Image (tube, grey):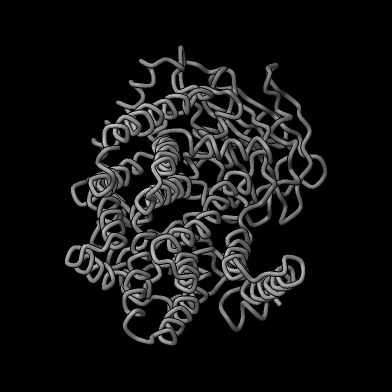
Amino acid sequence: MEFLSYKFLGNSELIKIILVCTSVSFLTFIFFKYALKTKKYLPISIITICYSIISLWTLGSTKFPKTQWQPIMDNQEIIFEVIGNNKINKIYAVYGIGDTNNNPDTYQIGSENIYIYGSNDNLNYSLITDLNNGSIYQYIIRDVDVNYKYIKIVATEKNSTLNEISFKNNENILKLKILSDLQSKYPASLLIDEQNLIPNEPTYFDEGFFDEVYHPRNAEEIVKGQYMYPSVHPLFGTTIIAFFIKIFGLSPFAWRIGGAIFGIMMVPLIYLICKKLFNNEYLSNVGAILFCCDFMHITTSRIGTLEPFSVFFILLMSYFMILYCYENNFKKELKYLAYCGVAMGFGWSSKWTVIYSSIGLAIIFFKSLFTKNKNKFIKTILWCILWFIFVPSVIYYFSFFITKIYRTNHFTISNIINHNIAMYNYHKNLKATHPFQSVWYEWLLNLKPIWYYSKTLNDNSRLTISCFSNPVISYAGIISLVYTFYLSFRYKIQSGFIISISFLSAILPWVFIDRCLFSYHFYPSTPFLILSIIFCLNHLMSKYNIKKLINIFVFVCIFVFIMFLPVICGFKTTSFYYNNFLTWFSTWYFGA
């Protein structure tokens, strides 16, 4: 089945995914009809379940070498004896964070300045290779062709680390015996105790990629109570990743599952937002489908990064603000404002980009406030001081509670202030460049995807992951945004005003930022782009019978989403497929 799907559809997983989604959808229908005896919420349930299946499909391995060796001095040596066949043609190595608490004068940098030597007499050694330039949680694979009875590993700097090292003859792991090792709390046995966890052909499924060299590292440090490698974002989202690492143990699945779950929860949330704004069940389901079909949403939810958490809280606080705007009962208004403030606090604690959307909500709030009961104005303002200033600040402060952002006195107001100043200065002074960097108008026009990952397997099949928007949705969204802006401000339509301000507050700050930016910075704007499409469809449906056209549009979005699944989820494909069918613009790049 996988071979047929790969051979004829350019997607090794598509047939299996379709069969599973069809089967689960049928079972869901039966459950609603006979167990719940209702069809209410059946469509959004099926939409959410099908998206969940795709989002979790080959998300990541639950196996990963976890025990870590590190030297306690510069130029520390380990000598292994190779038992049996000593022909070596591949060396695999992978590293993690090490024990930073035991090395307080520096940070563990990984597999830097580690050298591997070979000998047949245990006296005269020759250099085989080095393990420089390794990235955390990623495998280093060295192709060699040597025969040695003895292997010596030399770590020239004590801030190096290794999780596991394996010497192979083709796919056969060579057995090693420790001959010489310095007595320490990190014995050489930690290097060869998880040989069965090393894959023969590691892919994104087995190792980290892109920003997973940062956030899972900080999450593992939180789990282990380690002093942290400098973090440039608030740490609540990282703490969520740490929670799942604590449950499942360190692995690609563990550091990705949190983002995937939050991405799944956004689907019914966007449905509820549409339901409140438009009071139309059909269009609410259409909005959920379009959100599921946006490439950026699923790609970003399947990587161990912070965006799924920040965007979830942007949507959640927007939902509660919308409930406030449409509510006329004062007690319920206060309740929704309180919920919004709490969601805002967790959003700020996940990523600062949530603050941009908070400014938009402030505009929406004050516009709504001035149209409500003027006698409640002072009470509402005092309530908001509590829930939009004090409570979010407290949440933000305590989000650092279980982390060690500084080597001494980590949980103090002064240290947290200093840490946030350092975060600000990092982003302000960042001068880095990148071949896939882009700017805000390129996000709107969907011109410059960021290429996350690429791998050519031994059978010449390709794995590739890029982050960008569904082009059908993005270009329909641009037209819809213009129409939404016009209708909202021309006819003072509340739903359109909320969508317009929310979109502008999410994207306008990036117009004035000149540091290196990427297409995924458009992610917080994407939900409101989709809401603008639904707004326009709702307006047109009130005048014309266009339901069939909407169904065709939704079908096209789903079809394009399925077409691009291999390059947004990393499913096995061919270079012929994405070069001939998916490279719609010359600026789109998925690999050679």
Q: Is residue 422 left or right of residue 41?
A: left
Q: Which of 505 and 214 lies nearest the eye of the viewer?
A: 505
Split into 4 quadrants, where in the image is the C terminus?
bottom left
Q: Is residue 442 visible?
A: yes
Kindly identify the residue that appears in the image at 21 percent across and 46 percent down: 513
> Which residue is depicted at the point 37% across and 66% down?
530
Q: Nearer the viewer, residue 558 or 418?
A: 558
Q: Is residue 489 left or right of residue 546?
A: left
Q: Residue at horizontal 47%, vertical 39%?
A: 214
In the rendering, at what x and y percent does residue 425 appear?
Answer: 27, 31
327 over 45 or under it: above or below: above
Q: Position of residue 568 (x, y in %)?
A: 48, 65
Left or right: residue 326 compared with residue 285 = left
How many marks are shown on the rendered structure? 0
Using the rendered view, name the quadrant where residue 500 is placed.
Answer: bottom left
* Picture quarter with the N terminus: bottom right
Q: Position of residue 459 (x, y in %)?
A: 62, 70
* Residue at the farthest right position: 84
Q: Is residue 317 left or right of residue 481?
A: right
Q: Of all residues shown, which one is farthest toward the top? A: 409
Out of 581 and 391, give the one closest to the viewer.
391
Above or below — where is 146 with respect to 270? above
x%, y% of residue 185? 68, 18
Asked if residue 350 shows in the view, the reply is no
Which residue is the extreme one toward the front? 375
